[in-house]
Amino acid sequence: MSKRIKVLAMLAMVTATVGLFLLPQLALADGNCKNLKGNLSVVNNFDGTTSGTITGGEKLNGTTRATFSSTPIPTPDASTISYIDNFSVTTQKGILATSNVAIYDTGRGLFSEIARIVPDASTGDFAGATGVLFISGQTTDGGATFQAGIEGEICFISGQ
């Protein structure tokens, strides 16, 4: 058997072995995905952070904190900005951490965020979880408080 064939055979065996170890974890994650939906109430702390609560969200019920990691970024629409923030939900079962990208219409008080779960920063039942949450809502008092819906899918790595 030539050296080239031996190397190719070894690579095939390594690939197959890695695949066998990863396949059960992927199947487990697929079987533990939950669609969740709740209500988010937030207060602007006017120091680059917000704090709030999620209710009606089952596993998401808890307190929240967002820390804005960018200054507002202008968009082609003068009354609309975009921003980035790090968001966490502290529940009785752990902390869910997300990295968010958002858009905010200052004229209408409307906003929407894509919240990508950060598996390595989440703890407890949320440790290693993956998924995306969507947050959409509005302010009726010029940005002092916000009301929103939060929903999406969380894939847990264990039978949570």
Image (cartoon, rainbow, N blue to C red):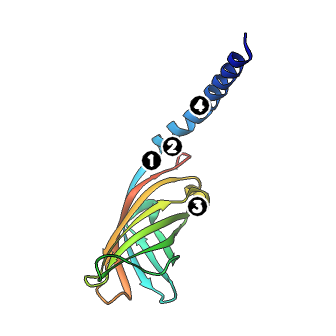
Residue 80: give x, y in percent of width and height: 31, 79
Which residue sits at x=66%, y=26%?
A: 11
Q: Mark 4 or 1 closer to N-term?
A: 4
Of pointers 2 and 3, the one earlier in the residue sequence: 2
From the image, tell me which residue sits under label 1.
33
Three-letter amino acid code of the residue under disc 2: Ala
Residue 145 on image: x %, y %: 37, 85
Cα separation between marks 3 and 4: 26 Å
- Amino acid under label 3? Ser
Mark 3 crowd level (few <14, some 14–19, many ≥20, 10 Å Cα): many
Looking at the rendered structure, which numbered label has been put on residue 122? Answer: 3
Q: Earlier in the sequence, mark 4 or mark 2?
A: 4
Q: Is residue 126 left or right of residue 147?
A: right
User: Considering only order in the chain, which callout, 1 or 3, is on the residue closer to the N terminus?
Assistant: 1
Query: Mark 2 sits on what residue?
Result: 29
Callout 4 environment at 10 Å: few (<14), some (14 to 19), or many (20+)? few
Identity of the amino acid at label 1? Cys
Residue displayed at 67% across by 19% down: 9
Tags 1 and 2 touching, CB below 8 Å: yes
Question: In 3D space, how far apart are the residues under numbered discs 2 and 3 (Cα atoms)?
Answer: 16 Å
Contact between marks 2 and 3 (CB within 8 A): the answer is no
Relative depth, front residue between 36 and 46: 46
